[in-house]
Image (spheres, rainbow, N blue to C red):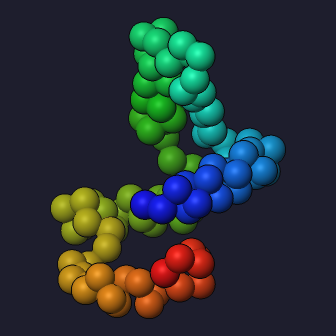
Amino acid sequence: MPKEFIQNVYKTLNDNITYYKSHFKFFIEIKNSNGEMNDDTINNAFKAAYNFFTEPIYNPIGKRFLEIAKKTSGRLLPNIHLSIENIRNQLKGWYSFF
């Protein structure tokens, strides 16, 4: 990955943290600097994620996806084989370096 891409994504994510926190019930920010990433941090994040992913689904869209997953052995997306060129073409609007 180009360094500029990583820096741009990092800035974009940081600029939008308040939005993410206000729009997503499950949002965990784990800082990975100055010794903040330790066993307690990882365990707390795991527990929060585990609780989120094991709680009942109430959203009708989520329930529909769960039913589809059950019927398709967990596959929500069809088997799609794309070339790297096809992927680049689809992502042109997202990332300027493609």
Which residue: 59% across, 78% down? 96
Residue that protrudes farthest toward the top in the picture? 40
**17 to the left or right of 59:** right
Instruction: Count up the numbered dots.
Output: 0
**61 to the left or right of 88:** right
Please indicate, yes or no, whether residue 22 appears anywhere in the rendered image: no
In this picture, is 12 found above or below 51?
below
Q: Residue 23, image x and y in percent?
A: 74, 51
Which residue: 46% across, 87% down? 90
Q: Which of 49 and 30 lies nearest the eye of the viewer?
A: 30
Place residue 9 in its image quadrant: bottom right
Q: Residue 17, image x and y in percent?
A: 74, 45
In this picture, is 14 found above or below 75?
above
Q: Residue 54, image x and y in percent?
A: 42, 35
**Quarter of the picture holding the N terminus:** bottom left
Which residue: 21% across, 78% down? 79
Q: Which of 30 and 68 lies nearest the eye of the viewer?
A: 30
In this picture, is 69 found above or below 20?
below
Which residue: 48% across, 32% down? 49
In this picture, is 5 found above or below 26?
below
Please indicate, yes or no, whether residue 45 appears anywhere in the rendered image: yes
